[in-house]
Image (cartoon, rainbow, N blue to C red):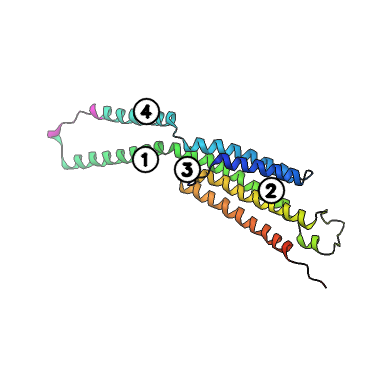
Amino acid sequence: MKYRSLDSTKVVDTIALLGKRIEERFPASKLKAVCDELHEIAKESQAKSEWIGRPQYGLRFAIGFVIVLGISALVFSFSLMDVELTEFSLNDLIIYIEAAVNDLIFIGIAIFFLVTIELRVKRRRALIALRELRSIAHVIDLHQLTKDPHRVKGPRLPTPSSPVDQMSVFELSRYLDYCSEMLSLTGKVAALYGQQLGDSVVTAAVNEVETLTTGLSQKVWQKLIVLQQPDVDE
């Protein structure tokens, strides 16, 4: 049971440790600031996902009170009706049945709307948080975008607009590896919401974030593979 769910504390601690590793290896890099932002988002997500996973008893009580009050008012209104059964015709019976069915349908819709308020509130909060995670994933991708392994391994013929890159092969491999780890951890933070809320809409959004981070991470690993290839003497 211990390893059947993600531990949000472990995820947050892992991101914090990654930030320290980046700072120690690249103290002047902006990648550390991005990792710090991811760490802040992860801490917020920890609190949000825990809130989403808890039953909101105050909201449930308020919804239950409104439902009971509405049903009581409906029953009371029926009790005030003065109907003479001897004067009932078949047409009257059909009209009353049709009206009762329509009322029951509207009552059912109203009850369904009230009962699902808690789910919709939690869903909205999760979707907003997942949108932030999609954004941070793209920010991470931007930081590795100009890191070209061919330029590091091959002859450097920069133009005036070429990005400044003074990393060695080893340093670039570590930089790209940190980007890949950050993308993977971004997907893990997203998974916290899917773990706490069994909603198809949230699950689909979590899968989209994980698909995005996996795809971006594959781009990083393609560069790492190039770095690991032995140099060919010309």
Q: Does residue 55 show up magenta in the picture?
A: no
Report the disc number at residue 217: none
**Which residue lies at the image location 45% right of the left edge and 39% below the top edge?**
119
The reply to whether dot 1 and dot 3 touch (C-beta < 8 Å) is: no
Residue that sits furthest to the left in the current view: 86
| Residue at the spot of label 2 | 139
| Residue at the spot of label 3 | 197
Between 176 and 142, the one nearer to me in the picture? 176
29 relative to 105 in the view: left or right: right
N-terminal of the two: label 3 or label 4? 4
The reply to whether dot 2 and dot 3 touch (C-beta < 8 Å) is: no
Mark 1 residue crowding within 10 angstroms, few (<14) / some (14–19) / many (20+)? few
N-terminal of the two: label 4 or label 2? 4
| Residue at the spot of label 4 | 65
The reply to whether dot 1 and dot 4 touch (C-beta < 8 Å) is: no
Q: Which percent across, then down, holds residue 123?
A: 50, 41
**Which residue lies at the image location 62% right of the left edge and 57% below the top edge?**
215
Element on which disc 1 rests = helix
Mark 3 residue crowding within 10 angstroms, few (<14) / some (14–19) / many (20+)? many
Q: Which percent across, then down, holds residue 151?
A: 80, 61
Q: Is residue 103 above or below residue 160?
A: above
N-terminal of the two: label 1 or label 4? 4
Q: Amino acid at mark 4?
A: Phe
Give the number of the mark in front: 1 or 4. Answer: 4
| Residue at the spot of label 1 | 109
How much space separates mark 3 and mark 4, taking CA atoms?
25 Å
Between 102 and 195, the one nearer to me in the picture? 195
Between 125 and 197, the one nearer to me in the picture? 197
Q: Does residue 83 show up magenta in the picture?
A: yes
Give residue 97's quadrant in the image: top left
Residue 146 is at least partly visible in this image: no
